[in-house]
Amino acid sequence: MQLQTQFPKHLSDRFPTRSHRRAALGATVLSIGLVLYGCGESKISQCNKVVTIANKTTALAIPKDLAGFVPLATNIDQIRTEIQAIAVQDAKLKELQTQLLGVYGDTSQALKGQVKASEAKDPNAMNKAKQDLETASKKESEIVDQINMLCSK
């Protein structure tokens, strides 16, 4: 038995020259690349990621006193950061993601503002912070409804 030094005969008939082999290899790589490009995350997958993280807010305990507001704000900031890290391609979902980020930022600020107003014994600031918190809560509910509607399609 001898060692073959040439390209195997059965393969060289299909691609007789090196340039033909390279062209075939290039076409194969291009085809695989196009297939993989089309396999990006679906809207449903992106929705599930946003919803899963947003649902973490429901597990947060509502503090019974002002001392718990700062840790709650910190937890909301962490959830906000996690939602911000999600790469969303769908334009409508991206818009809702941005709105949700704003609501969580507003909520965190309102909680911290409530604590500062209480420490300063400023009733006007306390009322404003409470109002801001209620507004953010309503907005969050509306955005969550829109995300659920978008993701159910």
Image (cartoon, rainbow, N blue to C red):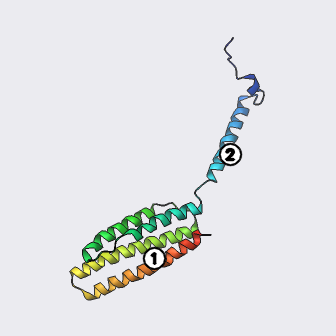
Where residue 60 sits: x, y (%)? Answer: 36, 69
Query: In the image, 114: left or right of 97?
Result: left
Q: CA distance from mark 1 to mark 2?
A: 43 Å
**Three-letter code, disc 2:** Ser
Where residue 118 sits: x, y (%)? Answer: 24, 81
Where residue 74 sits: x, y (%)? Answer: 32, 67
Q: Residue at x 45, y 64 (%)?
A: 53
Query: In the image, 85: left or right of 112?
Result: right
Query: In the image, 112: left or right of 82?
Result: left
- Quadrant where the image shows the C terminus: bottom right
Q: Residues within 10 Å of mark 2 (few under 14, many from 20)?
A: few
Q: Residue at x 67, y 17 (%)?
A: 5
Q: Write down the residue under mark 1.
A: 140
Residue 8 image-quadrant placement: top right
**Three-letter code, disc 1:** Glu
Q: Secondary structure at mark 2?
A: helix
